Structure formats: C-alpha cells, structure tokens
Image (cartoon, helix red, strand yellow):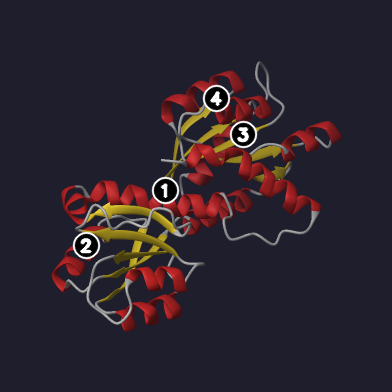
Amino acid sequence: MKTVVIVDNNINLLEQLKNALNKVQGINVIGTSEDGERGILDVRSLRPDIVITDIKMPKVEGTQLIRQIANEKMNYLPHFIVMTSSQDANTIAELRELPIRKVFNKPFQFKDIVEELEKILQDERVRVIIADDDVEFCNKLKNALNQYEDIDVLGIANNDEEEISLIENLTPDIVITDLLRNGKLSAENIIEQYKSQKFLVISYSPYATPQTRSNVVWSMQKYGIEKDYDELAFKLKRAKENMVRLKIDDVNSTTKEEKQEKGIWEKIKDFFKN
C-alpha cells in the first residue's frame, strides 16, 4: 500500500482527485491540504510515499514545499508529482532542479495520474531470489518474505548452477545469497561475475562480508534475519527504492535533460542512505 498526500488550493480538484485515487488498489490518500504551508506540516507528520502538489498556491508554493522537504534531511523523501498551469520559463527551470518524478500540465485527466501511481507501485515491487545450500533456511525465508505485499520471491537456488540459471532467466532485482557454502563457485565469484546484479549477502560469519563491493546492497548475519524479518523486508524495499530513484544503472545518459535528471538524483542520494 502506497500512501498519498495531495496539496492544492483548488478544493474541487482536491476532492475529485482524492476520490479517484482512493479507488485505485494499493493507493491510500491519507491527507489533503489547501495550501503549501499546511502541506509541509502534513508531509512531515504523515510521511507519505507520494506527494501530489500544485505549484501556484497561497502562503507557500509547491516548489518551496518540495525544496523544504528535500532539505530537511529526515532520511526520507517521497515521490513528488507536480500539477501546474504555469508556462513561465523561470518556473520550468526551477522544476528541473528539484527531485520531481513527474509534471502534469493542467488541465489533465485523472487517469494519467492514476497510471503514474500504478507505475510507482510496480517499480517498487522487489523481485527476489534466494540462494543458499540450506534448504530449510531457504523455505523458511521464502515463507516469511511472502507475507510482505511488495516483495515477490521468484525462486530458490540450492546450488551454484541453480543460482546462475535463476539470475539469467528471471533477472531479479536482488539476489539474497549465502556467502559461505559448498560448491564449485563461491558466492564471491558469482557476485563478481554478475556486476550489474544487486546482491544482499547473508552469512553466519560476521567477518565474511564483501561490503566494499558496489553491487552488494547490504550484508546481514543469518541469526539477525531469523530474529527480525521486518528489518530484512525494510532493507530489500530500501534497496529497490534506491535502484529506481537514483537510476543506478542509467550511466549512458546523453541528452541535456537526462544529464540534468541524473544530476538531480546525485544531489539527493544521501537521503536514501541507511
């Protein structure tokens, strides 16, 4: 479930959009504000996943709201979706400098915003495979992760060949892989071989954790996982969030707009560090 706060001084639009979004499965509008000043307070207190805000509003404009939340370093930053009727060059230039996911020019159709929220829901589903020669542990972990609606366990691998096959055929977002196990290839070998893949490393040893590898999103000890599956689920979701928002794999941006966008995500990357 993704939570939403809507900020707009047009009360009719506010209510209509709220009603439209609350009909979308997986979306819950938890707050509405009629000006930017109140919107800032609501975002701070409610910490929604998504903020949909108008730009031209009394007291505090939407650009100020976004900049304020982005600068507060709360280890939190929602997806910002902007509604605007302004074609002013300065406003457009300012929007390009802010961490905004999407801009909708008024008038727009509600279905366009619905489609964007559905993309967010899909983007942030975490597709996982589990690789460990401990069959009992794999099954226990799979059953635990299946309780979280944003996590899809695509498969289990109990040896190197199965892990490689699942990586290549299913292209998961994250591989949860045991670092210390028997096999022709070590987990280190596979992590090195699939540099474009993201791994969450698990091990009974607190010392065998390749934390310096750029494609290792976290290292965890197995006893810690078994004590707190919520923490593991949180870390998996945060890792996927990083991958989507920071566009880690988008290293070939060539257009001016793409370079600007990449620069924006670089500016805010510290917000997503654990």
Q: Amino acid at mark 2?
A: Leu
Instruction: Looking at this view, name the residue that lies furthest to the right.
Output: 89
What residue is pinned by disc 4? 39
Q: Residue 141, which numbered label? A: 2
State yes or no: discs 3 and 4 in contact (Cβ < 8 Å). yes
Q: Secondary structure at mark 2?
A: helix
Q: Amino acid at mark 1?
A: Arg
State yes or no: discs 1 and 3 in contact (Cβ < 8 Å). no
What residue is pinned by disc 1? 238
What residue is pinned by disc 3? 53
Q: Secondary structure at mark 4?
A: helix
The numbered mark, 4 or 2, whose residue comes first in the sequence reads 4
Q: Callout 1: 10 Å neighbours few (<14), some, many (20+)? A: some
The numbered mark, 1 or 3, whose residue comes first in the sequence reads 3
Q: Secondary structure at mark 1?
A: helix
Q: Residue at x 61, y 48 (%)?
A: 110
Whole-angstrom CA distance, mark 2 to mark 3, is: 39 Å
Q: Residue at x 44, y 58 (%)?
A: 213
